[in-house]
Image: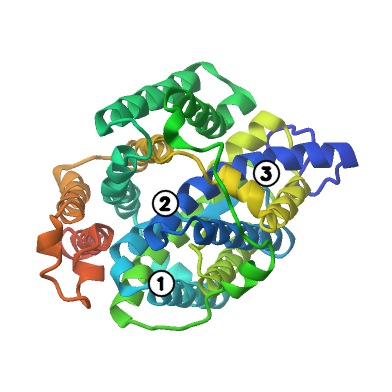
Amino acid sequence: MSRINFKYQLNDRLAPLELVLFGMQWLAISIPTLIIIGKVVTQLHFNDPARQIVYLQKLFFVTGLILLGQLLWGHRLPVILGPAAVLLVSIIASIENGINTIYSSILTGGGILFLLSITGLFGYIQRYFTPRVIVTILLLIPVTLAPTIIDLLTKSEAQASPVVNLTFAMVLVFSMFTAGKYLTGLWKATIIIWGTVLGSVSYLVLFSHYGFWGYKYHVSAIDTFFRNFNTSMSLNPVVIFSFLISFLALAINDVGSIQAVGELINPDNMSQRISRGLAITGVGNILSGFAGVIGPVNFSFSPGVIVSSGCASRYALIPAGIGLIILAFLPGIIAFMGSVPSVVVGSILIYIMSSQIAAALLMTFNSLEKFTLESGITIGFPVMLGIIVSFLPPDILNTLSSSLKPLAGNGFVVGVVTVLILEHVIYKNKG
């Protein structure tokens, strides 16, 4: 029996019209994150707009497929998923090693996550991720993405100068936070959608030379889609280790998102749901590695959508999964949605990452009974190292060998390894 009297419970079947309406709501909520993170990755990989569109097509396809897998065979909860920001950090740090190496590492990480979940070994690893470690990880992701966000905000795609772009970004972000203070229900849960749409329109009106509406695309919906699947394996142990650190953080995020919805609707067999959910997430990253796209993770904002809509039925998300798969074969629509100005992409990332920092701070004060100096050092020092490594000048990073750069040049990996040493070696709690 759920703790809140929802209009539709977990396994309730919806009438056709309501199924479509709720499904469209979940679809609209899932698309912005796919576009935002997907566009950041495509710009790292390709200069050709056609190849960028194909990447987004594959990302939509894999995400839709894994969403259906979670709803039918995985955790079987109303949890939306999308590309994992923590993997974006490792992709950026390993970009010089090539696409095949990056996505072979994602495939390998997904396989290891699948094995850990089905064997129950993940529980033994999870004990090392104490509240202080998890808080540090939550803080490290925004910190290590900061250089990429700066690049997005200062990129000159229009006649606007970097200063004008920064001013526009600040106005947009402050507007989103102001709207979040006064909006309620579904309006508040979909702020990212409205920020993306209204921000893009405003930017185009102010800087019409951006050329968005005249964007041309020449992509075959099916032929190019399947010819661009990545099947070339290139295993680099150092890069794989870098991604495995990110996968540990991804797994913790995945478990937290599933548990958050579980606490809300109180289903049965939660331990089994978590294990199956992690297993499907692992399969999703295997498929993502094979397809050459960033891997998925379950998102933690699902409870807000469930409460605001009054629908806790997992079947409401099935049309969203099907919709993502259909959109994957409509490159014209993907091209239109994927033409969001970079300054808007950077602004949305600021909003998302600021919310993540807030979640980390909230967890710090809620989970730690006594916040000591050791707690501050355990969290603060790894974050400081993450900042230093992330903002190292390129000429210093280039002095590192290609085998060391994915580790020593990755602020997230350096920060996570440091917090584990501080938590379990230097400041180990003997009790």
Measured as percent of width and height from the top left, residue 300 is found at 52, 45
Residue under label 3: 27
Type of amino acid under label 3: Leu
Q: Secondary structure at mark 1?
A: helix
Tell me which label, 2 or 1, sits earlier in the chain. 2
Q: Is residue 143 above or below residue 120?
A: above
Answer whether labels 2 and 1 touch (C-beta < 8 Å): no
Answer whether labels 3 and 1 touch (C-beta < 8 Å): no
- The crowd level at tag 1 (other Cα within 10 Å; few <14, some 14-19, many 20+) is many
Residue 104 visible to the viewer: yes
Measured as percent of width and height from the top left, residue 22 is found at 75, 38
Measured as percent of width and height from the top left, residue 384 is found at 16, 49
Q: Residue furthest right?
A: 15
Instruction: Determine which quarter of the picture holds residue 247.
Output: bottom left
Quadrant including the N terminus: top right
Q: Secondary structure at mark 3?
A: helix
Type of amino acid under label 2: Val
- The crowd level at tag 2 (other Cα within 10 Å; few <14, some 14-19, many 20+) is some
Mark whose residue sits in front, 3 or 1? 1
The colouring scheme, among rainbow, by chain, secondary structure or one colour, is rainbow
Residue occupying image coordinates x 62% and y 68%:
224
Mark whose residue sits in front, 2 or 3? 2
In the rendered structure, the answer to whether residue 364 lies left or right of residue 231 reads left
Tell me which label, 3 or 1, sits earlier in the chain. 3
In the rendered structure, the answer to whether residue 300 lies left or right of residue 242 reads right
Tell me which label, 2 or 3, sits earlier in the chain. 3
Q: Secondary structure at mark 2?
A: helix
Residue under label 1: 99
Instruction: Using the numbered discs, state the Cα–Cα distance from disc 2 to disc 3 in whole angstroms.
Output: 20 Å
Quadrant including the C terminus: bottom left
The dot on residue 40 is 2
Instruction: Using the numbered discs, state the Cα–Cα distance from disc 2 to disc 1 in whole angstroms.
Output: 15 Å
